[in-house]
Every structure is written in C-alpha cells, then in structure tokens.
Image (tube, grey):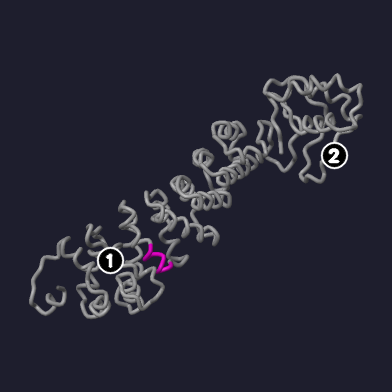
Amino acid sequence: MRLAELHGDLALDHDERYLTALIALEPGLQLPLMRADRELREELVWGMLRQEGNRGVSLSASDRSATMGSERTPGWSRTLAASIDEGLIERDRLLDALLDMLAADLPSGRAGWYSRTLRMLSMTLDEAEARQGALCALMSAPVGATVTLAVGQLSALSKAGRLDLELFARSCEGALMGSKANALAALTILRGGLSSAESADLEGLLGVALSFPHAQVQALAIDLASDALRSGLLGSAVVGRLLSDAELDPLVVATLDLLDPGHAATDQADPGLIPEDDPGEQAPAAFLPPPREVADLIPMSADDVSGRVGVLAQGAQMGLEYEALLAFLASPRVRPEYAGIVAPARAAPDHAQIRV
C-alpha cells in the first residue's frame, strides 16, 4: 500500500484506519522504507505509534521483535531502534512518544509493546533523570508491567543519587499497591531518602504499605516507620496508631520490635518494662534495658526476683523482665518459698507486650 502511494498509484487519506494498517507493514520492508521515505519517518510513523489498534491489528499483537533476542528479528521495535542508530529519527522523540502512550491508559495487552520497546532501548541515567516526572506518574498506571518499568528506572536513579525524592514520595503510592517486588523497591527508595520526605506523605504511604498482604513488605514498612520515628519525622503517637490500625501478618507480629509510646529518637535501648498509659509508680531504676544481642541476655537469679515480682505483677505492661521472670519460675532453680508468687505473676499476661 505504502509502496503504491510512493509510486503515485494510490492517493489515500492518512487517517486512523490508514495509520493502523501501517502497523501491519511487512517487517522486511520497514527499515528500507524508513530509509527511503521521509514522510514515513518524519510524520506517519509517529501517528502509527499513537494508534491503539484493534482486535486484528495492533503493535502488541503484530510485533514481538523487542523480546526475540536477535537484532536480525524484524519488527517495528527493532526497526525504530535501527532507525535511531542510523540517524533517521531522534532517540529522545521516540522515548517521549513511548512514555506518552504508556500514560494513555491503554489496556495491558496494548501497553506491553511500549514497555518492551522502552526496555530494549535501555534508557540511560541522563535520559531517565530528564523524564522523572513522566516515570513517577507511571507508578499510578493500572498495568503492572508499566509500574515495574517505572520503578526500575527510578530505583536506578535513586542508587545513583539522582532521584527527586520529594517527587517520588508524592507519587509512589501506586507502587505500594501492586506487586511485592515493586512495593519492596519503593520502600527501599523511601528509606534511603527519608530526610526528603514530608511527614504527611510518609504517614499515608506507611498506612498503605502496612496493609500490603505480604509479611516481607509489612516488615520493611515497619523498618521505615522506625527510621521515621528515630529521625523525628513522625511522632510515636502516629506510628502507634498506624501499627494498631494495620492487620499485620503473624510472622511480622512475632518479630516486631515494639515501637512503644516512650520510644525516643535516639540510639539508646528502650527500658525492659513498658509503663502503662496511666503513669503510676515508676519501675525500679535497676530494671535492665533489653540487650542488643541475644548472647548478652542474662537470665534472672533467685536474688533478682526479690523486689521485682511485686511491680511486675501489678498494673504494668510486661516486657523483657516479665519474660525473664517466667523463665526463672519454670526452671529447676526455683525454691518452694517462691511458689506463692507464681499465681500473681501469671495473672498479668492478658495485657502483656513482649519484645523479641
């Protein structure tokens, strides 16, 4: 058809039907025509790229050359890449056209060709940095492969220290609601650029991430919350509410390093006994903070029990000291005279909080 036009045998309107039909141009003729036909490479091919196609003809259905693994495989993806190499078309124009179509809310079957072609072209860091706005917007796309493409490019920018972290934090909610890999990548970027995030943005993002139905994502979200608490970006009340509202996976709950209301934004260890909200008598100063290493944990002795069990059995939420006490009472070292304290000590676990 196009050859007939070039030879003056046909005069056709270059409407949507024509541009869709151009998709089906014989692969072996595509590159030769791009070389010989100025109108094709400067105008028609860009109109073709904007066509969604139909059930019979579309770029996604007609061309798999981008994933065939051979530069000799004909198809529009390879033809356009070769045209860039030969200086027939501008690389920047093609990258922008492909990103524009990915943002056009195409169905997944149609969008696949554009993301495959972009991957084949392998954007450089400079090219990705110049298109951060478009890439961040694509994290809200309904097609998983499109989001994965955007997150991959933005992750590369983050590792190179060239990502606009404020823009990313405002845009990445969609990445936290799709695949596990994208959610983990987005949380990793947020942890690395925490100082650039706004507290309001971060609070909302943590709420989304903590509701993700996979323990690994929830655990990384808790790490991010802990970082935000230590840095002072979020208050303990906000973090506590986020954790209480989340339906955490049992695997996460079992390994949760409790972020209690008394947590300070320092590197100091928290106290082993966590006071209740109602500030009663303070725990004895001799109570030990939890060690950083398991090997440093010292079991209670009979002497340690004296003076501690009374506080532990009264209105306090139980932490490390309570666990050490139970371990002692269950050990062969306990003497008969301590039997009377077992009952009150075991009456408290209903409101216990255990730090592991």
Location of residue 94 in the rendering, given as x and y in whole percent from the top left corner? 33, 67
* Residue 333 percent location from the top left of the image: 90, 32
Q: At which x and y percent is residue 148?
A: 44, 56
Report the side of 278 relative to 63 (left or right).
Answer: right
Crowd rating for badge 2 (residues with CA inside 10 Å; few <14, some 14–19, many 20+):
few
Q: Is residue 245 magenta?
A: no
On the image, which quarter does residue 287 sit in? top right
Task: List x then y, in percent, for residue 35.
Answer: 25, 80
Q: Bin the neighbour count of mark 1 within 10 Å (Cα to Cα): few under 14, some 14-19, many 20 and up.
A: some
User: In the visual, does 30 lie left or right of 232?
Assistant: left
First to last magenta residue range: 116-122
Asked which secondary structure carries label 1, the reply is: helix
Is residue 188 placed above or below 327 in the rendered structure? Answer: below
| Nearer mark to the viewer, of 1 and 2 | 1
| Residue at 48% across, 54% down | 164
Q: Amino acid at mark 2?
A: Ile
Q: Which residue is mark 1?
A: 62
Q: Quadrant of the N terminus?
A: bottom left
Residue on which disc 2 sits: 298
